[in-house]
């Protein structure tokens, strides 16, 4: 980006900040392309600089390492997610807003982005710094969604008996699974997968699926049905 400066007049701080943000976003876009093309582990800072059309030395002015690039990606996604969740929180139809949000992130997101997430998750399994960043953003997203469901309960949109934290735990696991299937299976039917996810979400939010049921104890006898840990009800 070229900034034209009149003689003796310095650019205002907002102009400088806007230019820096644009350059950082350009670099992050290049980093995403590299991850999707060659994987996180094989991507080097030189690869990112080349993709961004700048020298490695100039790249280091903005990001000191691949971990710093990951942090930049996470922060950028956090800002986008926060805006999306605020729209859901303000809605008078939480279920409908969640479906619209899911459609945006599960159906409209390019498959390459799913591959990118898989690469970063894989790196998190062996890089404590990346793992810490991923865990932090996961917690923030989960806490935000739980708060939205609690507000929906308070406004009467979903039953008060619904366990908000348990519902979000289930939906988050299913959402991660959707991203994984899309990344690993190019022919995965994402429309049908999303339909199933929405049906489960509807059942969870309406209280049709009890999430407080204890885990059944498996019988030692082959072919015998599992035995519930619940104590039998004795009539008085």
Image (tube, rainbow, N blue to C red):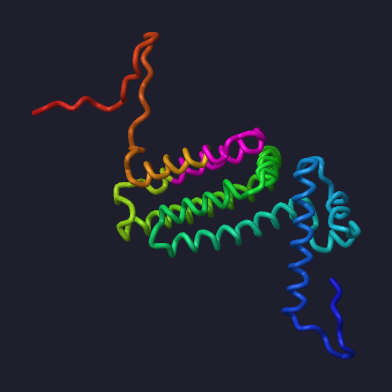
Residue 82 position, x and y percent, is 55, 61
Boundaries of the magenta span: 168-192
Residue 187 position, x and y percent, is 64, 33
Q: With 123 as the anchor, is 43 left or right in this view?
A: right
Q: With 210 as the anchor, is 231 left or right in this view?
A: left
Q: Within the image, what quadrant is residue 202 found in?
A: top left
**Residue occupying image coordinates x 31% and y 25%:** 229
**Residue occupying image coordinates x 36% and y 21%:** 217
Residue sticking out furthest to the left: 236
Q: With 187 as the anchor, is 168 left or right in this view?
A: left
The quadrant of the picture occupied by the C terminus is top left
The quadrant of the picture occupied by the N terminus is bottom right
Task: Check if residue 185 falls in the magenta segment.
Answer: yes
Residue 106 position, x and y percent, is 57, 46
Magenta: predominant secondary structure element?
helix
Q: Within the image, what quadrant is residue 15 found in?
A: bottom right
Residue 184 position, x and y percent, is 66, 34
Nearest the eye: 226 or 115: 115
**Residue occupying image coordinates x 67% and y 35%:** 186
Task: Check if residue 229 falls in the magenta segment.
Answer: no
- The total number of labels drawn is 0
Residue 92 higher or lower than 113, as above or below: below
Residue 178 higher or lower than 159, as above or below: above
Nearest the eye: 113 or 73: 113
**Residue occupying image coordinates x 24% and y 26%:** 231
Residue sticking out furthest to the bottom: 8
Q: With 7 as the anchor, is 24 left or right in this view?
A: left
């Amino acid at each position: 980006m070229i900034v034209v400066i009149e003689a003796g007049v310095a650019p205002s701080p907002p102009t400088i900040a806007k230019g820096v943000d644009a350059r950082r976003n350009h670099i992050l876009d290049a980093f995403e392309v590299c991850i999707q093309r060659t994987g996180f582990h094989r991507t080097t800072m030189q690869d990112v600089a080349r993709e961004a059309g700048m020298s490695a030395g100039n790249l280091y002015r903005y990001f000191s390492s691949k971990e710093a690039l990951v942090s930049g990606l996470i922060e950028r996604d956090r800002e986008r997610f926060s805006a999306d969740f605020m729209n859901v929180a303000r809605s008078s139809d939480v279920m409908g807003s969640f479906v619209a949000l899911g459609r945006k992130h599960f159906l409209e997101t390019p498959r390459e982005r799913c591959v990118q997430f898989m690469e970063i998750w894989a790196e998190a399994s062996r890089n404590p710094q990346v793992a810490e960043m991923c865990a932090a953003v996961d917690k923030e997203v989960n806490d935000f969604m739980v708060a939205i469901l609690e507000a929906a309960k308070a406004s009467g949109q979903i039953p008060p008996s619904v366990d908000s934290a348990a519902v979000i735990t289930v939906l988050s696991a299913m959402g991660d699974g959707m991203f994984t299937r899309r990344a690993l299976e190019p022919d995965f039917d994402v429309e049908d997968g999303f339909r199933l996810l929405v049906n489960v979400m509807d059942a969870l939010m309406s209280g049709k699926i009890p999430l407080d049921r204890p885990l059944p104890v498996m019988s030692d006898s082959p072919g015998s049905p599992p035995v519930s840990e619940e104590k039998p009800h004795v009539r008085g």
